[in-house]
Image (tube, rainbow, N blue to C red):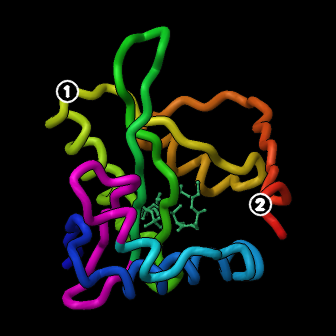
């Protein structure tokens, strides 16, 4: 049976492992720059920078959903910003992803938050199908990123 739990202290190693699985699944894991220490600092404090839901099959973590909170200025309310959703390949098509999304929605409702937003690669057709089936609507926009990491070198 699949259960979904919020990540607790000590789960950093499980989370890093799942993040690396997702990175390897999508592209080389060289993009994963975070580590256990950075994650611990970001998650386990009063106002966390990010939060994680973990899906377990018995004792084994088989998927995760990460999120942050954001503020819609025009609406005047906060919304959940979904960062990653990942289910280990061996556990797909068993509604693990759906359970993670439903738990995220539950957290929103408990906090009187009515919207979850996230980004999906246009070519990720199966994920788009999955989200549409849940009832999410999608529209195409361009993502801009101004990376000035070079300013901090030397
Ligand atoms: C997208 C993702 C999270 C879905 O996770 P999942 O646990 O496989 O999701 P579900 O089992 O709820 O649904 C997946 C499929 O199984 C089917 N399914 C689920 N339960 C079923 C059941 N009882 N009987 C028959 N089919 C079922 C669904 O129809 C769905 O197919 P479709 O959406 O392609 O039509 C997973 O595929 C994944 O990790 N992908 C790689 C990472 C990724 O792309 N993440 C999203 C980035 S935005």
- Verify whether residue 14 appears in magenta: no
When the figure is inspected, residue 97 is found, relative to residue 9, above or below; the finding is above
Q: Position of residue 63 (x, y in %)?
A: 40, 74
User: Which residue corresponds to mark 2?
Assistant: 152
Q: Residue 90: image x %, image y %?
A: 48, 86
For the point 27% across and 48% down, which residue is it?
A: 47
Position of 120 with respect to 5 (left or right) is: right
Kind of element beneath mark 2: helix
- The verdict on residue 47 being magenta is yes
* Label 1 environment density (alpha carbons within 10 Å; few <14, some 14–19, many ≥20): few
Residue for badge 1:
112
Q: Which residues are magenta?
A: 41-62
Residue at disc 2, CB closer than 8 Å to ligand 1: no
Closer to viewer: mark 2 or mark 1: 2
The residue lying at 23 percent from left, 67 percent from top is: 4
Q: Identify the mark nearer the N-term, 2 or 1.
A: 1
Q: Is residue 32 left or right of residue 142?
A: left
């Amino acid at each position: 049976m699949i259960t979904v739990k919020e990540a607790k202290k000590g789960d950093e190693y499980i989370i890093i492992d799942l993040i690396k699985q997702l990175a390897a699944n999508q592209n080389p894991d060289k993009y994963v720059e975070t580590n256990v220490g950075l994650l611990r600092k970001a998650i386990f404090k009063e106002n966390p920078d990010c939060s994680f839901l973990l899906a377990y099959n018995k004792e084994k973590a088989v998927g995760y959903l990460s999120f942050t909170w954001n503020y819609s200025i025009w609406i005047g309310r906060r919304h959940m910003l979904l960062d990653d959703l990942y289910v280990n390949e061996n556990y797909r098509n068993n509604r693990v992803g759906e359970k993670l999304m439903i738990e995220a929605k539950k957290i929103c409702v408990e906090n009187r938050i009515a919207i979850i937003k996230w980004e999906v690669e246009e070519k990720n057709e199966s994920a788009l199908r999955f989200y549409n089936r849940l009832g999410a609507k999608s529209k195409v926009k361009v993502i801009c990123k101004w990376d000035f990491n070079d300013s901090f070198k030397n």
